[in-house]
Amino acid sequence: MSGDSLVEMRGIHKRFGETVALRDVDFTVGRNEVVGLVGDNGAGKSTLIKILTGVYQADAGEIRYKGRPVRIASPAHARSLGIEPVHQFGSTVDELSIWENFFLGREACRHLGPIRILDKKTMREITRQTLERLGIHLDDIERPIGTLSGGERQAVVMGRAVHFGGELLVLDEPTAALSLRETERVLEYISNVRRMGRSVILITHITRHVYPVADRFVVLERSMKIADVAKDRITRKELEDLIVRGRLEAERI
């Protein structure tokens, strides 16, 4: 197994009753890499990621994180390792401000003798600086997050994941409900996350969204991996054909 890999999943098998959801799937993510996990609905993408993030346990196979074997027992365990699922809007509260959402459940405090006081100044400054590094410049971080556009809210959630130790961000269909302009912004934020030294798994079936930002594509079909190919070895049209038809000169890739 490669020492350059952040995550390695080998021989992953999962069934639900009589239904085989994953059959002997290998999946790796390198350090500072964006991997597009693609395939049609029902291919097994979500099941694979739920195993990686501790929602499900594999029936067979192994997972290594930073070269060490791990059994990811829960979503909390995954987060403690640095694996951060980024949900589109489900982890924000519309009525709270941008900075309050950024630190939701992880508030920074300072001590005044035995008393702990929220350090609002620090939280505001960290929120502003992190979002600027992602490429989003907001005039007023006191605004309720519910007033932001979809792409801006995605940036807040990604920034929060990065700040709190996320080394691998897992984005499941992050652009599915966004306009073309908002989609372009989110793809820019993903590229900036990579420039910050993090890795990203981008799960989608929309090739025009994943192709511009991914370094490599892993294609699943009917519970099996059918391709693992670097972007410089496949065109977007070929990737689309592979997803739709399940074949594309497989020996070449």
Image: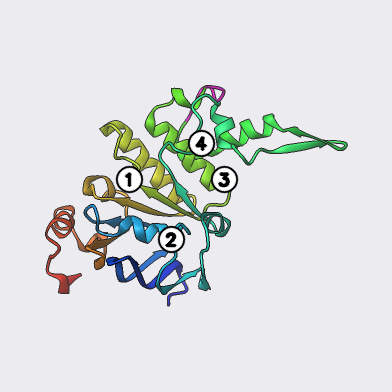
Mark 3 or mark 2, which is nearer to you? 2
Write down the residue under mark 3.
163
CA distance for labels 1 and 3: 22 Å
| 81 left or right of 146 in image | right
Residue 141: quadrant of the picture? top right
Q: Is residue 170 visible?
A: yes
Residue at the image position 88 percent from the left and 36 percent from the top: 113
Q: Amino acid at mark 4?
A: Leu
Nearer to us: label 1 or label 3: 1
- Most prominent secondary structure in the magenta stretch? loop
Report x, y in % for residue 90: 44, 38
Q: Quadrant of the C terminus?
A: bottom left
In primary-sequence order, the first of circles 3 and 2 is 2
Query: Residue 137 versus residue 203: which sits nearer the camera?
Result: 203
Residue beneath label 4, please?
131
- Distance between the alpha carbons at the discs numbered 4 and 1: 21 Å
- Between the C-alphas of marks 3 and 2, the distance is 26 Å
Which label sits in the foreground, 4 or 1? Answer: 1
226 or 76: nearer the viewer: 76
Q: Amino acid at mark 2?
A: Tyr
Magenta stretch contains residue 139: yes
